[in-house]
């Protein structure tokens, strides 16, 4: 079973992941986070509201599931957007063939509304896709997009509220052009 949770910044993706894993039997799962995401600490998955859960760092350049214990039934990965689809998807399929459930969450699109990492491709083949929304910073409507508050052109820029915001379709151009 493949379940993907997607949405913009501040939509509750990591909160959903943490709430999910707290219901699982200890020892039956592993929660991974990308090793490059150091915003809130190492070896811990943390929401923007401070909720946390221990996590294992997964190297985004060299993904390795070979050390997983046989008794694991579920693999949970936060911030799928930081992983290359070409590298991650074959490994996920391999784990599914072993009978493991895969749960993942991440941004579907970057601040330019361009596909970002593995989240979107995985959502298209998922058994279950959960789309989350934030609240638009400008008008308060459901926000399906993230926008960048700082003038940095790289697709990869770690940040939180000081760097990113959430917006609806109607407000995206206005908020995105303010940088």
Image: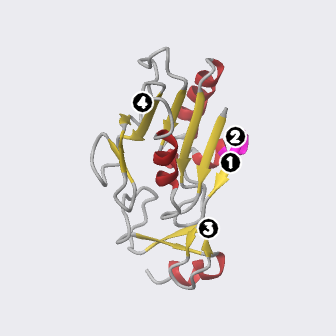
Q: Which mark is residue 62?
A: 4
Residue 57 in the image, given as x and y percentages of width and height: 35, 36
The quadrant the C terminus occupies is bottom left
> Residues under labels 1 and 2: Cα distance?
6 Å
> Residues under labels 3 and 1: Cα distance?
15 Å
Q: Which mark is residue 144?
A: 3
Camera-near label (3 vs 1) is 1
Looking at the image, which residue is at 55% across and 42% down? Answer: 104
At label 1, counting other C-alpha atoms closer than 10 Å, the crowd grade (few under 14, some 14-19, many 20 or more) is: some
**128 part of magenta stretch:** yes
- Say whether residue 111 is visible: yes
At label 2, counting other C-alpha atoms closer than 10 Å, the crowd grade (few under 14, some 14-19, many 20 or more) is: some
Secondary structure under badge 4?
Answer: loop
Secondary structure under badge 1?
Answer: strand
Is residue 159 placed above or below 98 in the rendered structure? Answer: below
- Residue extending farthest top: 70
Q: Which mark is residue 129?
A: 1
Secondary structure under badge 3?
Answer: loop
> Residues under labels 3 and 2: Cα distance?
19 Å
At label 4, counting other C-alpha atoms closer than 10 Å, the crowd grade (few under 14, some 14-19, many 20 or more) is: few
At label 3, counting other C-alpha atoms closer than 10 Å, the crowd grade (few under 14, some 14-19, many 20 or more) is: many
């Amino acid at each position: 079973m493949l379940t993907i949770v997607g949405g913009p910044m501040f939509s509750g993706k990591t909160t959903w992941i943490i709430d999910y894993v707290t219901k699982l039997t200890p020892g039956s799962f592993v929660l991974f986070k990308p090793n490059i995401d150091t915003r809130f600490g190492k070896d811990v998955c943390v929401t923007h509201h401070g909720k946390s859960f221990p996590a294992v760092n997964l190297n985004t350049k060299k993904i390795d599931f070979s050390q997983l214990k046989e008794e694991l039934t579920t693999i949970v990965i936060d911030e799928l957007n930081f992983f290359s689809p070409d590298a991650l998807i074959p490994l996920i399929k391999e784990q599914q063939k072993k009978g493991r459930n895969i749960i993942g969450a991440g941004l579907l699109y970057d601040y330019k509304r361009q596909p970002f990492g593995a989240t979107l491709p995985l959502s298209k083949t998922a058994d279950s896709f959960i789309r989350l929304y934030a609240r638009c910073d400008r008008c308060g409507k459901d926000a399906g997009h993230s926008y960048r508050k700082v003038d940095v052109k790289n697709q990869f820029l770690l940040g939180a509220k000081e760097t990113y915001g959430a917006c609806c379709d109607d407000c995206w151009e206005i908020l995105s052009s303010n940088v």
